[in-house]
Image: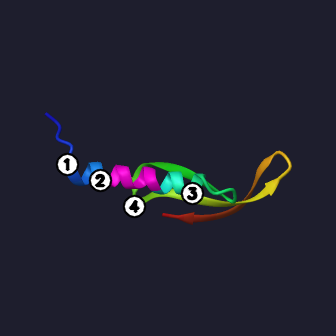
Amino acid sequence: MPIRSASQRIGRTGKRGVESLIDGHPRWVARRQNSDFVIDLKAELANLGLEGQVLRRQLIKL
């Protein structure tokens, strides 16, 4: 039977928290990374436009 460790649970909670903080900011967009190759999340800078966020293609990999 598969086992989910406490550290896996803590890590997932942390990722969701950081994603929520980034997405809550008007100038940043969070993008999840499904494959776990060290990068768990990307944050992309955006400008505020008339109809929403205009992505600038400037990324930070977390």
Determine the residue positioned at 58% across, 59% down: 43
Cα separation, mark 3 vs mark 1, equals 26 Å
Q: Quadrant of the N terminus?
A: top left
Q: Residue furthest top?
A: 1
User: Residue 9 placed where, x, y %?
Assistant: 28, 48
Choose the circle earlier in sequence order: 4 or 1.
1
Can you tell which mark lies on residue 18?
none
Residue, disc 4:
38
Q: Residues within 10 Å of mark 2 (few under 14, many from 20)?
A: few
Determine the residue positioned at 17% across, 41% down: 3
Under circle 2, the secondary element is helix
First to last magenta residue range:
10-17
The amino acid sitting under disc 2 is Ile
Under circle 4, the secondary element is loop
Choose the circle earlier in sequence order: 2 or 4.
2
Image coloring type: rainbow
Residue, disc 3:
22
Residue, disc 1:
5
Choose the circle earlier in sequence order: 4 or 3.
3
Choose the circle earlier in sequence order: 3 or 1.
1
Q: Residues within 10 Å of mark 3 (few under 14, many from 20)?
A: some
Residue, disc 2:
10
Q: Residue furthest right?
A: 50
Relative placement, left or right, of 33 versus 1 is right
User: Residue 37 placed where, x, y %?
Assistant: 40, 57
The amino acid sitting under disc 3 is Ile
Quick check: 15 above or below 2? below
